Image: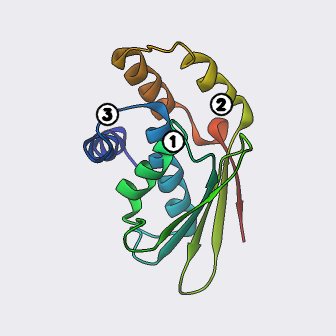
Amino acid sequence: MEKSEIAALIENAEKLHGHLGPFLVIGVKMSLFAMKNLKVKNGDNLVVKAKLRAKTPYTCILDGIQATTSCTFGNRKLSLEETDSSEIIVKFVLKNNGKQATIQLRKEIVEYLNREMRPLKISDLELRKLAWEIAETPEEKLFTFETQ
């Protein structure tokens, strides 16, 4: 996928979400990576199961997934398993054959973003900068990945 196509998807997710931040972009990138590996063009045949902390900024990932895959809480194709762990694991499952891609955000990325976002009043400009930094980071540096 070209850089301009990813940028358009991120901008669409930003409109849905209300602002741009790195965890929103992670949701977009996870979705694109899973769909590429599962060889699907859209989320019509997907069910997505996310396991993460049910608090911001982690839940921003869910809006990135919704904007990219059209799997939403409303259509019941996106579900959340709440955890107290800092692990962020998202499973993308093809409904027709059960093939799945499990993507985990690397622990060091979570720690890095938590450090960078720690100031209580991080500016929108700083959030945007972090978001575009994540957008430009290769998937293999962001995620571990497994298909079944």
The type of colouring in the image is rainbow
- Residue 103: percent from left, percent from top: 65, 54
Q: Above or below — where is 81 with respect to 97?
A: above
Decide: few, some or many residues near mark 2? Use Cα within 10 Å; few <14, some 14-19, many ≥20: some
Q: Above or below — where is 78 with respect to 128?
A: below
The amino acid type of the residue labelled 1 equals Ile
The amino acid type of the residue labelled 3 equals His
- Residue 69: percent from left, percent from top: 40, 62
**Element at badge 2?**
helix
- Front-most of 77 and 106? 77
Residue that lies at the very extreme toward the bottom in this rendered image = 96
First in sequence: mark 1 vs mark 3: 3
The residue beneath circle 1 is 26
- Residue 52: percent from left, percent from top: 63, 49
Q: Above or below — where is 91 with respect to 86?
A: below
Mark 1 in CB contact with mark 2 (< 8 angstroms): yes
Decide: few, some or many residues near mark 1? Use Cα within 10 Å; few <14, some 14-19, many ≥20: many
As drawn, the label of residue 19 is 3
**Element at badge 1?**
helix
